[in-house]
Image (cartoon, helix red, strand yellow):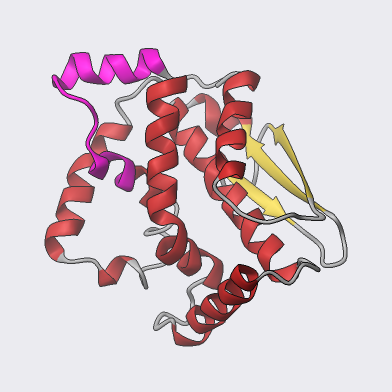
Amino acid sequence: MTKSTSSNLITALIKSFKGNTEFGITIKSQDSISGANGTTSYKIGDTNFTITISTSQAKSRPTIEVARTILHQYIHADIYRKLYTKYNYTFINDFRSVYNSYKVNIHDKNADPEHVTMAEFYLEKMAFALKSFHKNELKNDYNKYIGFYGSEPSNYFYKALAWRGLKEIDTTAWDKLSKDEKEKIQLEDFKINLLTKGCN
């Protein structure tokens, strides 16, 4: 994924989230991150979030999967923004109420409330953003998929992509899905690894 395509992804994401913010985001890469494809760091009181992407992991993964990692980490930053902003929008207060309810009610006490919130609150947006990015910015990869499978990727393909990094970490939201929904997602998941690898 080149700098221009990653910039287009971030631009598309930012448009999805409402409200002014006092925060900035720095996206950087480093060779490896212990046990992770990417991380988002923030210290309360700072005005910047730092997203770090592992280049060694990126090189061995499909480009759309690396885009999913950037999106996943950006949403961590958006959650922090909503929790710690000085602005007092109604939707910010509503979000905090939803987040706190997830925090209190998650049945898996080892679950991270951020990942529960991501799965419950952001997953459909994630799938939509990844579908748009794949079709418009990764056209060669998208067309190769169509050439191989004979049809465009389904919405379940992008849901499967969005669920990566969530269902493995937290089962709270995943367990709510019907057996049929899970099977459709899992059927699409294996196709992701067949996509173009070698992300820049």
Asked whether residue 164 is drawn in magenta, I would say no
The count of marks equals 0
Q: Is residue 164 visible?
A: no
- Relative side of 130 to 2, left or right: left
Image quarter (top left, top right, bottom left or bottom right) of the C terminus: top right
Q: Foreground residue, 107 or 85?
A: 85
Question: Quadrant of residue 32 in the image?
Answer: top right
Magenta stretch mostly in which secondary structure? helix
Q: Is residue 46 left or right of residue 184?
A: right
At horizontal 53% and vertical 24% (from top left) the residue drawn is 59
**Where does residue 91 sit, x and y in percent of width and height?**
59, 69
Quarter of the image for residue 55 reads top right
Give residue 52's position: percent from left, percent from top: 69, 42
Q: Is residue 118 left or right of 7 when viewed as pictured?
A: left
**The magenta stretch spans which residues?**
139-160
Where the N terminus falls, by quadrant? top right
| Residue 191 appears in view | yes
At x 45%, y 64%, the residue is 121
**Identity of the residue drawn at 61% across and 43% down:** 14
x, y (%) of residue 61? 45, 30
> Is residue 178 positioned above or below 18 on the image?
below
